[in-house]
Image (cartoon, grey):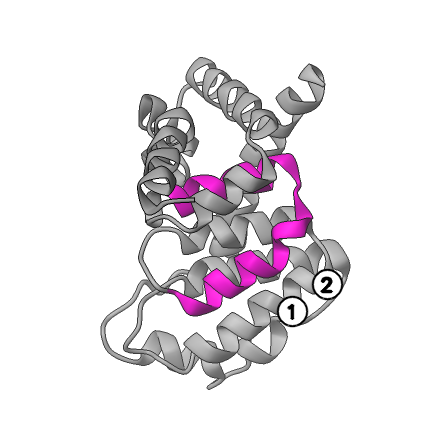
Amino acid sequence: MHHADEESELLKLIRCYVTPDRRYLKLGGSILGMSGRERAKFTRKLGKAAIEVSPRELGVLLEGGWRERKTAAWLIAVSGRTEFRERLGELLLASEGPYAGQAYCVALATFGTLADADLLVAYLDRYLRRPDLYYDQTAALGALLLLDTRLGAGQAARFLTPDGLWQQWVDGPPGKDRDAPDSYREFIDQLCVVADESARHCTARR
């Protein structure tokens, strides 16, 4: 496939999945501020898109920029395509660009297994040692705490000991939010609820 063909395919996929109603901007915290009707419409369209997109097309989107990757991660979360687990884990760990990491964390949290928790642990092990980097540490910790709750595991505990990696990261420059770790778990949980609502539209259409 020529480079121009790849580019035109990516542009087609962006128009189809990423930019309608500025979807890529709304995936995340802004969904939680929507009215009930607005949210129902948004999740219905997201569920429809998650059924329609093919695994190959998701692969193409994951090669794109942050908008494409963020949208693809949400479509993967909604459709429960766990075959993308390792790829999302790689992208999260690479942290090549902004804005998409939270979506990877949401997807791993929706998959909900120990394998997903391990990918979050690997991320936290690397990036909590870098207080100078304010990346997706809060989303990753929130997702891991959520999985710990669901799986009855305690993988986040070692990060949260007094003077542990979490405290060192929070205390290091630059200044960071000092919200309780549980608030990040609740936030990721709310985003997983949105993914579940969208997934119900998926199953309703199948």
Query: Residue at 22% across / 73% down in the picture?
Result: 174
Q: Is residue 140 visible?
A: yes
Q: Secondary structure at mark 2?
A: helix
- Tell me which amino acid carries mark 2: Leu
Range covered by the magenta-colored residues? 68-95
Q: From this viewpoint, which residue is outermost toward the right?
A: 152
Find residue 107 and report its horizontal and vertical position in percent. Answer: 57, 48
State the count of labels.
Answer: 2
Could you tell me which quadrant the C terminus lies in?
Answer: top right
Q: Position of residue 45 (x, y in %)?
A: 50, 20
Camera-side residue of 31 and 170 = 31
Can you tell which mark lies on residue 118?
1
Residue at point 33% right, 49% down? 65
| Residue 21 lies in quadrant | top left
Main secondary structure along the magenta-highlighted residues: helix
Residue pushed farthest bottom?
A: 163
